[in-house]
Image: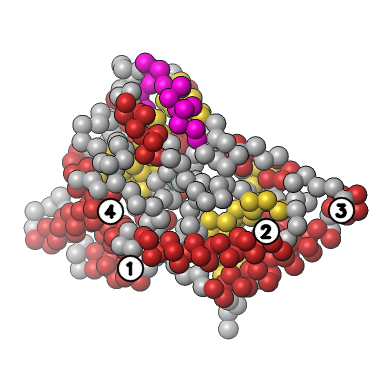
Amino acid sequence: MGKRIIYMDHSATTYTKEKVVDAMIPYFTRHFGNPSSIYSIARESKQAIDTARAQVATALGANPDEIYFTSGGSESDNWAIKGVAYANRKRGNHIITTTIEHHAVLHTCRFLEKEGFTVTYLPVDRYGRVDPADLEKAITDKTILVSIMYANNEIGTLEPIPELAAIAQKHKVYFHTDAVQAIGNIPIDVKAQNIDLLSLSAHKLYGPKGVGALYIRNGVRIENLIHGGGQERKKRAGTENIAGIVGCGAAIELATADIAGHNARIRSMRNRLMEGILDTIPHARLNGHPTERLPGNVNISFEFIEGESMLLWLDDEGICASTGSACTSGSLEPSHVLLATGLPVEISHGSLRLTLGDANTEEDIDFVLEVLPKVVSRLRDMSPLYQKTTKDGGSHV
Ligand SMILES: *Cc1c(COP(=O)(O)O)cnc(C)c1O
């Protein structure tokens, strides 16, 4: 028998739900026609895309002709930012974003800086929240776009999007939000919330990988990112990923059907996990906002610990989690998000992110609450700094 796996990394990706896979399968086998063709099997593919587009539009409060399918969150972010930048460069060259965005946004902005655009990176407070007053102050007559994420993928903090978008609208500046982590967790209505562009990805909401969408409000001036054929109403070339698009539509419909019920269940497990860890493990601090956070997100830093070692020990117990530092080319890069909240580098290395989702149970929480304190104390027993500091009775937190 294989060992029991406890998956607590739903912000990295989710499994694809059975119902979603069932909806996709016929589009690999029976309904494989290219929707640009005119025979009847092609019409079936075209109808499937129309249905999926309507499902995504309904979930966001948008019109179907404002939804464009893409290869996922990264492409949607690239398209929104580069597309608006290039199409509006005569109006201005200034873009505003934040220091805690996903790399799909940050690296796109860095690229545009080399192309002659100026980017303001708004700071966040210790909880990871942007102050709307800072946005108001940063807008100039050269500003063409504001891009601020709905919910942060590392610390789970929710940004005050309706308030921020209203400020952009008042100054006639386009407002884009990366809502990849928020959809299915927060009710979103792009019209009521003054959102001009919104990125989403299917594999973060129990759909397949490699497909997502960009909502573009009718009237937004935007350049194409992928040039070629006339697909997606001449805005995004390439033969459609029909099965993926069907999966994206089915997944978003399921994910937004009962947000309140989903949140209540996940949040109650999350709170027990979060409080259990903070109550039993000393020298631990919660990252992100105590209440304004994604229902499934726990992010805690443990002093005197190295995150990667913690992950290996947890993996040994079948627990899948992630840490606040990524091992890139052999060196440990502290998370830009944790550093932006003011967390010292050495503490950010000892961060653990557990993200709960639909497959988790109360037994999973019990198991992590049993295993994690042992893992942390075992690692601390090996740390000379911890031995010394606890003898002195001191702590950084
Ligand atoms: C996962 C993620 C992305 C990237 O989406 P992909 O579909 O994997 O390209 C972008 N932004 C956020 C906030 C994410 O969590």
- Whole-angstrom CA distance, mark 4 to mark 1, is 19 Å
Question: In the image, residue 317 lies at what x, y percent?
Answer: 66, 71
Instruction: Return the residue at label 4.
Output: 59
Residue 394 shown left or right of residue 274 in the figure? right
Instruction: Return the residue at label 2.
Output: 278
Question: In the image, residue 113 lies at what x, y percent?
Answer: 47, 23
**Amino acid of disc 3:** Thr
Residue 44 found in image quarter: bottom left
Upstream in the sequence, badge 2 or badge 1? 1
Q: Which marked residue is nearer to the observer: mark 2 or mark 4?
A: 2
Give the residues in magenta: 130-145
- Whole-angstrom CA distance, mark 3 to mark 1, is 52 Å
Q: Secondary structure at mark 1?
A: helix
Is ligand 1 closer than 8 angstroms to the Cβ of mark 4? no
Upstream in the sequence, badge 2 or badge 4? 4
Instruction: Return the residue at label 1.
Output: 21
Residue 161 shown left or right of residue 297 in the figure? left
Instruction: Return the residue at label 3.
Output: 390
Residue 240 visible in image: no
